[in-house]
Amino acid sequence: MKYLKTKHEKNSAKITALIMLILLLLLFVVGQNYMDPPEEYGVAINFGGSSGGGGGAPAQAAAPNKTQPEETKPQEEVQQQEAAAAPTSKEDVITQEDEDAVAIKKQQEQAKKENDAIAKAKADQLAKEQAAKAAKAAAEAAEKKRQDEIRKANDALINGISNSENASDSNNNGPGNGPGNGSGSGNSYGPSKFGDGTGKGSGNGVGYGLNGRGKPRFNTIVQDCNESGLVVVQIEVDRSGKVVKAVPGVKGTKNTAACLLEPARKIALTHKWAPDSNAPERQIGFVSINFKLGQ
């Protein structure tokens, strides 16, 4: 069976659908009003349990039973809520105060630790500075003492050599039969002294004096300090031409600084003369070194 065959049937279906749609829209737009919550209808009934039960005026007895819970129940609930909330609020306040006190105490402890660390650092720095000053003062005192001892030793050495030279007679004979004593004028191997006209320069600030032995070979040594001045070294030379003894700072020396005496002694020890079997076993002479700044 087929529907909507004719044009009229199709038009009828369209009109019917349109009418139904309009009715549905009207139901939604112009619908029945309702209340939320809905109104209550009827009569309140008292099922007993009231002290005023029995007898007349049930309506008057029921009314107080109905309205009493409605009036007292919210007030009781409010009182219970306030009673329950009061301890909680007090506990919250106490807890908050405790937390604040703990936070403040932690801040105070942290500040105290920082202050203690700063004070300790300052104390350590002060102790280090004092220790450095004490070490510096001790080093300066030790250096001063060492310089004094060197100066005293040089003075004693110079005085001893001067006394030995003053004890010699006018013929350059020593006070005994020691090595290198001259035998008076005419001895070609007699001792040589600085300033007696026998010194010979080498062009580099080093002079020497050793009678009858010719020209030596030697090396130069750079000083350890930046000093200048003349240092005379008394030497003893054996027959092979080797310097076997050197005493710096003898008569004629212009600078007795320890940093010049030691290199002067080393330079004197490097001198080497030609061997001479006729020379004394120990022949006395000198080496003079004129130090310049930086040399």
Image (cartoon, grey):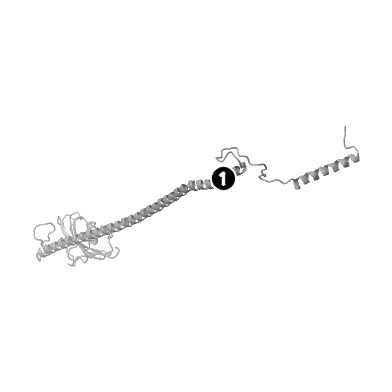
Would residue 209 be seen by someone viewing this image from the given angle? no
Q: Quadrant of residue 291?
A: bottom left
Residue 108 percent across, percent down from the top left = 38, 54
Q: Quadrant of residue 245?
A: bottom left
Above or below, 105 relative to 9: below
Above or below, 184 relative to 82: below
Q: Of 16 and 87, which appears nearest the observer?
A: 87
Image side of residue 51 versus residue 276, left or right = right
The kind of secondary structure element at disc 1 is helix
Q: Quadrant of the N terminus?
A: top right
> Residue at horizontal 89%, vertical 39%?
9
Q: Quadrant of the C terminus?
A: bottom left
Q: Residues within 10 Å of mark 1 (few under 14, many from 20)?
A: few
Residue 23 percent across, percent down from the top left = 80, 44
Q: Of 230 and 285, which appears nearest the observer?
A: 230
Would you name the residue on which mark 1 appears?
Answer: 68
Q: Of 206 and 263, which appears nearest the observer?
A: 263
Q: Quadrant of residue 178?
A: bottom left
Residue 4 percent across, percent down from the top left = 88, 37
Amino acid, disc 1: Gln
All told, the count of numbered labels is 1
Above or below, 204 relative to 79: below
- In the image, farthest residue toward the top: 1
Image side of residue 76 versus residue 12, left or right = left
Residue 31 percent across, percent down from the top left = 75, 46
Would residue 8 be seen by someone viewing this image from the given angle? yes
Q: Of 158 and 275, which appears nearest the observer?
A: 158
